[in-house]
Image (spheres, helix red, strand yellow):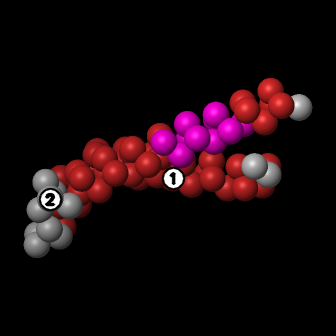
């Protein structure tokens, strides 16, 4: 994987993990400002999805980086 693509995907992984943290910390505040959205059905599943995808993308980038270092 090229270095620029790896850097871009690393930034995306950090944004996903950051979004997970923000949604978990401020889910109650966001829910109170949008009364029609229930946090249990929208915010928390969305937060966990962001967290899982961020960690999986980060792990993929790290494993690909290790693989490319061992080949060269």
* Quadrant in the rendering for residue 59: top right
Classify residue 71 as left or right of residue 42: right
Residue 15 in view here: yes
Q: Which residues are magenta?
A: 56-65
> Disc 1, disc 2: CB below 8 Å?
no
Q: Residue at x 79, y 52 (%)?
A: 2
Q: Which residue is at the front of the view, 64 or 47?
A: 64
Image: 38 above or below 20: below
Q: Residue at x 47, y 40 (%)?
A: 55
Q: Residue at x 23, y 51 (%)?
A: 44
Residue 9, x across and y down, in percent: 63, 53
User: Which disc number belongs to residue 41?
Assistant: 2
Magenta part mainly helix, strand or loop?
A: helix
Q: Earlier in the sequence, mark 1 or mark 2?
A: 1
Classify residue 71 as left or right of residue 57: right
- Is 54 part of what is drawn in magenta? no
User: Which disc number belongs to residue 1?
Assistant: none
* Quadrant in the rendering for residue 29: bottom left
Q: Secondary structure at mark 1?
A: helix
Residue 18 in view here: no
Q: Which residue is at the front of the view, 1 or 24?
A: 1
User: Which disc number belongs to residue 15?
Assistant: 1
Q: Which residue is at the front of the view, 35 or 56?
A: 56
Q: Residue at x 72, y 30 (%)?
A: 66
Residue 37, x across and y down, in percent: 14, 68
Residue furthest to the top in view is: 70
Residue 34, x across and y down, in percent: 17, 70
> Quarter holding the C terminus?
top right
């Amino acid at each position: 994987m090229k270095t620029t693509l790896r850097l871009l995907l690393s930034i995306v992984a950090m944004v996903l993990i950051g979004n997970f943290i923000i949604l978990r910390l401020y889910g109650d505040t966001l829910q109170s400002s949008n009364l029609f959205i229930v946090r249990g059905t929208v915010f928390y599943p969305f937060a966990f999805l962001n967290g899982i995808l961020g960690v999986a993308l980060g792990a993929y980038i790290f494993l690909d980086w290790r693989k490319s270092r061992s080949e060269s």
